[in-house]
């Protein structure tokens, strides 16, 4: 309590320690995990495993974006793929050449 009779919170250090612990007890508790976070062993290394399905995401491959984003179960290969507009331009060009070839064939057939 403050001198005016008002209770003031003073943090964890403001509480009294009723149980006296030695330094060895505190360090043992930290190692065994009975007090505070458990220390990870220094000799162990963590590894990350990504559980991708072995297939490449069709949407990402064709358009360069995927509606599922990072939660997509397929692999988003950032390799050398063409963008959607490039694929569309090539398709239109093939269609135009195909139509020209058919038109030439029709003209030569009509003669």
Image (tube, rainbow, N blue to C red):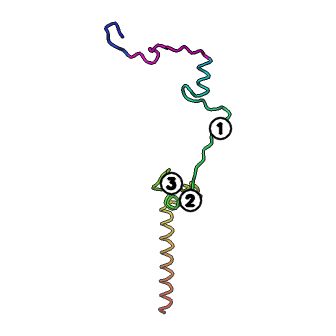
Q: Quadrant of residue 39?
A: top right
Q: Residue at x 48, y 66 (%)?
A: 88
Q: Secondary structure at mark 3?
A: loop
Against 45, is 24 above or below? above
Closer to viewer: mark 3 or mark 2: 3
Residue pointed to by mark 1: 45
Q: Which residues are magenta?
A: 9-23
Q: Secondary structure at mark 1?
A: loop
Residue 67 circle label? none
Distance between mark 1 and mark 2 Cα atoms: 30 Å
Q: Secondary structure at mark 2?
A: strand
Q: In the displayed structure, does residue 50 sit left or right of residue 1?
A: right
Residue pointed to by mark 2: 56
Residue pointed to by mark 3: 72
Q: Residue at x 54, y 26 (%)?
A: 36
Residue 37 position in % (x across, y down): 55, 29
Closer to viewer: mark 1 or mark 2: 1
Closer to viewer: mark 1 or mark 3: 1
10 Å neighbourhood of mark 2: few (<14), some, or many (≥20)?
Answer: some
Q: Quadrant of residue 8?
A: top left
């Amino acid at each position: 309590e403050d001198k005016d009779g008002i209770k003031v919170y003073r943090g964890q250090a403001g509480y009294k320690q009723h149980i006296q612990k030695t330094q060895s007890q505190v360090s043992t508790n930290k190692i065994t995990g009975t007090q505070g976070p458990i220390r990870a062993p220094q000799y162990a290394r963590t590894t990350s495993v990504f559980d991708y399905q072995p297939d490449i995401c069709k949407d990402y491959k064709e358009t360069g974006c995927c509606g599922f984003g990072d939660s997509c179960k397929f692999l988003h290969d950032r390799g050398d793929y063409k963008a959607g507009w490039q694929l569309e331009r090539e398709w239109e060009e093939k269609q135009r050449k195909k139509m020209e070839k058919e038109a030439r064939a029709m003209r030569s057939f009509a003669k």
